[in-house]
Image (cartoon, rainbow, N blue to C red):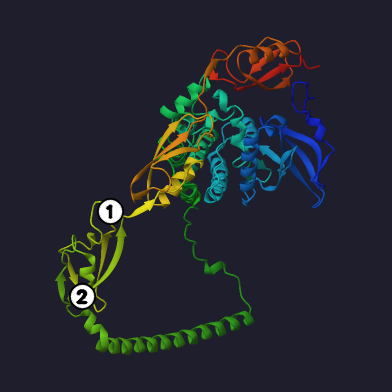
Amino acid sequence: MGTPGSENGMDNKDKYIGRVFDERYEIQSLIGEGGMSVVYRARDLRLNRSVAVKIMRDEMAADEDFRRTFCAEAHAVAMLSNPNIVAVYDVSHSDDIEYIVMELVDGITLRQYMDRRGKLQWREVLHFTRQIARALSHAHERGIIHRDIKPQNIMMLRDGTVKVEDFGIAALENEVYENNGQAIGSIHYIAPEQARGELPDARSDLYSLGIVMYEMLTAQKPYEGDTIAEIAVKHINAVATPPHEIADNVPPELERITMKAMCADIGERYQTAEELLEDLEQFSREQLRPAEQEEKPLENPAVMPIRSVSEMSKERFLLRHRRARRVTFLLGSFGALGLCVLMFVYMWNFWLKEVFSPAERISLPNFVGSDYQKVLDNAELASLYSFDIVYVINTETESGTVLSQNPDPGRSMMITPDGIKVSLSVSTGKVFNPVPDVVNLDYREAKTRLKKAGFLADIENATSDSVTKDYVISTSPMAGEQMSSGSTVYVIVSTGPQTSYIRMPNVIGLSEEAAITRLESAGLSYGGSDRIYSDVDPGTVIGQSADAFTEIEEHSKIYLKISLGPQE
């Protein structure tokens, strides 16, 4: 069961037990909790089945932006349907509560399994990785990135089935700590681009999966360090020790696949989950291919069983029947062969002779630089060539000018009845379009709209107290102005209000009340407390979510760990 709530804003996790949400989901017991939510076992009264209900913590539900992101992610994930993904059945949000109804998985996490077993056999690694890759492939095809692949988010059933949970949602827990620069619980699996603060994509999930593969093969994480920052730097710059130098019996091909998946250079990494799956399937076929069977020796007639008269009569009948079928087959084959000869003679006389006879060939002229309309209107050229026109935006060349051709000029071509096919790339010249209005749009959506309108986008960042982070403040030229296609539009994107940093105080050893006062006087926000048993006096702070004396953003939320005293 969860620990009781406190007067300082912590969730009272028992308050939901026994309640029925939306006249359907009866909350029964606590399963676990994370940084942003608490998970309960519940009963779906309408379908009479057990489910898991994830309820957002009160302090998270109070953040409107976080609620909106949480709901958007949950609705998107609810569209996924794959045997290797924990299913999301329902999403509900009201004025006072946000929750997700999920498949209740009867099993343990891959983290728990690895802690019990240590280094896994390569066949287990292959079995688990293929299932995780299938889950990623399904989600990536639908535009959903997990962003937090790690053993804690992978469930294992008793029959060996693997299910990935919290697609698009797990990483939101880390955003609770985003302001103080921490990536709690995921820094060992984070992709280099995420460590640099860049947006993750499908290849980031594949990097994290590569780290999980490495840990399964070696029972070690590839990068360790005394601080989060040190580990993050290793993800970016270091090269992991090859698994075979740590563990025995690691197949070279499986090691190569692992190291490619966790390559720091995103361009050298697997680009899609399908590409990773293809290598895994090929490795599986090569490793599990059965050995060649030895030829079976002939039976010894001396020890063959004596057959009855009826059996021998039956066998003589079958031999005659097979002989008659062979004769019929041969007659049919000769008849078909004769028919083919007659058809060939007929076709040769009427058109094959013309096809295989020496054909007239000409040298392809140079059309580059010509006016394509004059080329098309030339009757002599029209009788010899079949032109395919491809228009290319080129503001430096007059409209209608042929920029290139395929095949190249001077190539010897055979004249055909349908004409020699030639592709001409033709300049559109300067095409003027109005600049679309992208102000107050997310910069990614702005880039997409500008591209569709025929423009390039050059992103510049600026602080703003009125425009949300990552949204467009202004463009140059402004919306509505006419510009030639291919021109660059300069987009000013908000980085949010100007950030000031302060030094994180050390509140460990203080009472909870004194620690909260100390945080608020330093310009920080108190986010809540977790209570755990320890040898320290009850009510004493034994942990803080940001390291003491580090530089963090002003007004960051700080979470505390409070001692409950020794456990009886």
Q: Residue at x 61, y 43 (%)?
A: 73
Q: Is residue 326 above or below residue 114?
A: below
Q: Is 361 positioned to the left or the right of 282 in the image?
A: left
Q: Residue at x 27, y 60 (%)?
A: 425
Mark number for residue 36? none
Q: Residue furthest right?
A: 18
Q: Is residue 308 above or below residue 566?
A: below
The mark lying in front, picked from 2 and 1, is 1
Which residue carries the number 1 mark? 394
Distance between mark 2 and mark 1 Cα atoms: 29 Å
Q: Is 125 positioned to the left or the right of 448 in the image?
A: right
Q: Is residue 134 visible?
A: yes
Badge 2 marks a residue whose secondary structure is helix
Q: Is 504 positioned to the left or the right of 14 in the image?
A: left
Task: Choose between 562 and 567: the one closer to the eye.
Answer: 562
The 10 Å Cα crowd at callout 1, few under 14, some 14 to 19, many 20 or more, is some
Who comes first in sequence, dot 2 or dot 1? 2
Task: Choose between 262 and 466: the one closer to the eye.
Answer: 466
Q: Is residue 240 visible?
A: no
Task: Choose between 323 and 218: the one closer to the eye.
Answer: 218
- Work out which quarter of the rendered image holds the N terminus and state it: top right
Q: Is residue 521 above or below residue 371?
A: above
Q: Is 428 positioned to the left or the right of 434 in the image?
A: left
Which residue carries the number 2 mark? 384
Q: Amino acid at mark 2?
A: Leu
x, y percent for residue 527 = 67, 23
x, y percent for residue 157 = 67, 43
Q: Quadrant of residue 567?
A: top right
- Work out which quarter of the rendered image holds the C terminus and state it: top right
Q: Amino acid at mark 1?
A: Asn
